[in-house]
Amino acid sequence: MSTISAVSPTAVLAVHVRFENNSLLVALSDGREISAPLEWFPRLRDATPKQRKHWRLIAKGIGIHWEDIDEDIAVSTLLRM
């Protein structure tokens, strides 16, 4: 599943990802940190801690990819939630 879409070159980018208390937390290039409940992302919710830790930034930070569970989440999607 992919939620990556075209974004402006001046868009805010992800710089780091972590998980805490059943939430996804994403540090952004402008200094903000946004969070979303894992319940919104069933693949991440159901993933093991090891699978969750195996992420990488894609397209210089416009999104995050988890290879082990075939999940992509765009920063723009998180900002709209």
Image: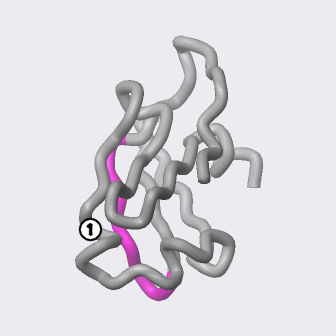
| The C terminus: image quadrant | bottom right
Q: Please give left or right for residue 81 compared with residue 31 in the image.
A: right
Residue 59 in the image: above or below residue 50? above
x and y percentages locating residue 36 in the rendered image: 60, 67
Q: Residue at x 45, y 57 (%)?
A: 70
Say whether residue 19 is left or right of residue 4. left
45 lies above or below 70: below
Magenta residues, dominant SS class: strand
- Please state which of residues 34 and 56 is positioned toward the viewer in this rendering: 56
Identify the residue shown where x is 42% and y is 66%: 69
Q: What residue is rendered at 48% in x and 40% in y?
A: 63
* Among the 4 quarters of the image, the one containing residue 74: top right
Looking at the picture, the colour scheme in use is: one colour
How many numbered marks are there? 1
Write down the residue under mark 1.
53
- Classify residue 78 as left or right of residue 24: right
Mark 1 Cα-neighbour bin, 10 Å: few <14, some 14–19, many ≥20:
some
Residue 10 on image: x %, y %? 54, 14
Residue 37 screen position, x and y as percent: 61, 76
Amino acid on which disc 1 is placed: Lys
Was residue 39 drawn as part of the magenta stretch in this picture? no
- Secondary structure, mark 1, is helix
Question: In the displayed image of the protein, which residue is found farthest to the right?
Answer: 80
Residue at x 64% of width, y 45% of height: 3
Residue bounds of the magenta highlight: 15-22
Residue 17 lies within the magenta run: yes
The image shows residue 56 at horizontal and vertical percentages of: 30, 47
